Amino acid sequence: ETGVTQTPRHLVMGMTNKKSLKCEQHLGHNAMYWYKQSAKKPLELMFVYNFKEQTENNSVPSRFSPECPNSSHLFLHLHTLQPEDSALYLCASSQAQGDNSYEQYFGPGTRLTVT
Amino acid sequence: GQNIDQPTEMTATEGAIVQINCTYQTSGFNGLFWYQQHAGEAPTFLSYNVLDGLEEKGRFSSFLSRSKGYSYLLLKELQMKDSASYLCAVRDRDYKLSFGAGTTVTVRA
C-alpha cells in the first residue's frame, strides 16, 4: 500500500537543529493528520487539516509547526526539540473529517531520534 | 476525552483463536475501529463497528456493545503473519480518533 508516503523514514537530529517531515497522499483525500507514537503508549493525535484548514491542534508544543499547502501534502516542521520528542511520527489521511467514510489510511511513519 | 483499555500482550499458537478485548469510556461515540500494525510499518484498517453486534470479515471478526463500552477483535485460524500489534480506536462526535496503547499478539508455531 503506497497511498500515503512519508519522508524521511528515519531522522536523527540535535536539539538545536531544524528539520521537516513530509507526508504525501495519493488517494484524493481532503483530510490529513499527524500522530505521535511513543513506545508502549497510544497514538496521540497532534494536528488535523480538513480541506487545507487546520481544525485541530491537540495542545501540541510550538516547537512542532504543521503546514498543509494543499490537500495532498502535509509537513511537520521541527525546531529546538527535546529528547522526549523522540518517537514515531505517523501521517494519515481520510476522505474528509466529519465524513461517514470511516477509514484513515496511515503512512509508514518517520522514526525520529532527538539527541 | 476517551479512556481506552486493552491488554498489553497476548500469546497464542498457530491455528488457534485469540480474542482481544477493548473497553472504552467516551463523552461521545461515533464508531470503533481496529487496526493492525506490524513492527516498523503503518497501521492498517481491519474493522469498523458503529452498531451493536458482530462484524465478520474472513478470519477476523469484531464485536461491539455500546451500552457496555466494550468491543473485542477475534482472530481465528491464527497464522504466523498475524503476529503484530492490534490497536483499538474510538471516534468521538467530532470525528477524532483516540487510540488504545495496542495489544501485541505473538503467534507461536
Image (cartoon, coloured by chain):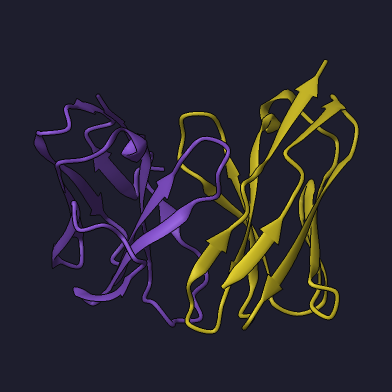
Residues B55 and B95: in front is: B95
Q: Residue at x 72, y 39 (%)?
A: B8
Q: Colour of chain A?
A: purple
Q: Could you tell me which residue is drawn at 28 percent across and 31 percent down?
A: A9
Chain B, hue in figure: yellow
**Does A62 appear above or below B105?**
below
Please state the horizontal and vertical placement of residue A50, each as a whole percent of the image: 28, 76
Q: Position of residue B10 (x, y in %)?
A: 80, 33
Closer to the camera in the image, A111 or A101:
A111
Image location of residue A8, percent across then percent down: 22, 33
Count of numbered circles in the view: 0
Q: From the viewer's side, name the closer residue of B98 and B46.
A: B98
Q: What residue is rendered at 44% in x and 81% in y?
A: A99
Would you place residue B72 above or below residue A12 in this image? below
Q: Nearer the viewer, residue A42 or A4?
A: A42
Image-quadrant location for residue B63: bottom right
Residue at x 90%, y 32% (from the top left corner):
B16
Horizontal side of residue A56 vs B11, given as left or right: left
Point out the image quarter for the N terminus of chain A: top left
- Residue A60 in which image quadrant: bottom left
| Quarter assignment of residue A92 | bottom left
B1 with respect to A88 (left or right): right
Give the side of residue A87 with respect to residue B56, left or right.
left
